[in-house]
Amino acid sequence: MSQLFTSVQNNSVSIPVWLDDLIFSQLSAVYEPQYKDFVVLEWTKTEIQKYLGTYFPRSFAESLCIFSKYFSERHEEYKDISELSLFDFGCGTGGEIVGFILAVSQKIPHIKTINVYAVDGNRYALIDLERVLASTASETCVDINTNIIPLKIDDFYDMEILDNLITKKFDFIISFKAISEFVTKQQFNTLNPYEYFLNAFLPKLSDVGTICVADVSSFNQISKEWLPIMMDNAVTSCGKADMIDRNIDFNECYYISHSKKANDVSNIFWRILKTKASQPIKKDSSSDVKKDEWEELCKQMLSFFDENDHDSSKDKKLRLASLIEAQRQHPNNLKAVLEALLEKDEWKTAKNHKPKKIFHQMHKTFSPSEQGTFF
Ligand SMILES: C[S@@+](CC[C@H](N)C(=O)[O-])C[C@H]1O[C@@H](n2cnc3c(N)ncnc32)[C@H](O)[C@@H]1O
């Protein structure tokens, strides 16, 4: 087996020899950057060869860096899982899929199977993608089940077709530099395509599911808006996702080396999201809860209380009132809320008495664990 892995340091990546050989020698890729905005959807075979030689290595490197970091920080979540599913929206030649697979192989090597579903409207790109994934499967110890969906999405109706085709739930849904093309072509009329994407695909995430959107960080001449700002507006107005990681600063730089170019530079923004329900609440310190998560935590504590305190006397009402009051008086500070309850007569009862038990259960459920999560 030729050199499979490549080191990821300071966002700098050299593409592995086997991949370099595949794209430049076997698939006749050409390194030729474009210095203006472009839409790849309609590109010809010759143009896709330029895409493969220039932008495939960039997407490969960006995805490898993003997911290496992600899996380094969250490998615990995947410790009992042996198979992953990945859906790529606007996959093109699939550089980001190979980056993802190599990050999995390096960081969570017990994963033996990845089921890949990839949709794109450019058939030349998809022909290359098939070859790329077949080689990736033979170079890694991962079984890759490839499901390619050739579909050109012109409007909402085509999105519905895609929706009906995809009945599965996915562990990862990714889109690299594709949604910007929907912005440029105003495919969803005046709707923000990032929001449309989130609303369509968040329901398709599995329980541990994660969405990763990466895109060019440029100012779009059609929407008259910076794309990272459009993305952040989409997250806010969709309201169903929490951002669990993102690039540093406005955009992040990656450096890619291969046989045709040393230290080629790419600039992107990226966001990693989970649906609100599946997102564990994190603490900032032993007592603090992040401000944007406080409200959700309070709601969870109240419903926990309601489900567990079956007392029908007025004491229950008193306990509920003091819980609400303590949350109000000590915002973002769970430890202080619990301490305040212990001062209240209605919560201060003999150890084996029901309210004390509820208090202990609540403490156990909502207090941060060693890893800093509540659940
Ligand atoms: C800039 S390329 C990115 C490809 C790949 N994700 C990467 O990072 O290398 C954008 C991709 O989105 C696809 N795409 C854009 N608009 C599309 C549409 N309306 N329907 C289907 N595919 C589309 C293009 O065919 C192209 O392959």
Image: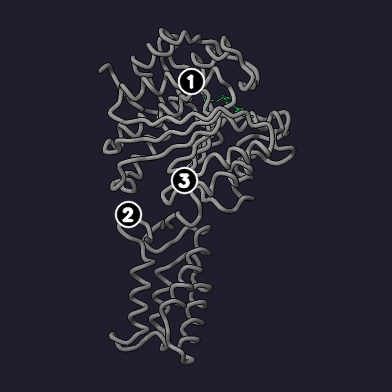
Q: In which quarter of the image is ligand 1?
A: top right
Q: What amino acid type is highlighted by mark number 1?
A: Phe
Say few, some or many: other residues with alpha carbon within 10 Å of mark 2 (under 14 / 14 to 19 / 20 or more).
few
Instruction: Answer whether labels 3 and 1 touch (C-beta < 8 Å).
Output: no
Q: Name the residue under label 3.
A: 169
Q: In this view, does 306 lie to the left or right of 152?
A: left
Residue 216 can be seen in this image: no
N-terminal of the pair, mark 1 or mark 2, is 1
N-terminal of the pair, mark 3 or mark 1, is 1
Q: What amino acid type is highlighted by mark number 3?
A: Lys
Residue 253 position (above or below residue 84): above
Asked if the residue at label 1 sits under 8 Å from ligand 1, the reply is: yes
Quadrant location of the N terminus in the rendered image: top left
Q: Name the residue under label 1.
A: 56
Task: Give residue 320's position: percent from left, percent from top.
Answer: 49, 81
Camera-side residue: 141 or 365? Answer: 141
Q: Name the residue under label 2.
A: 371
Task: Give residue 58's position: percent from left, percent from top.
Answer: 48, 22
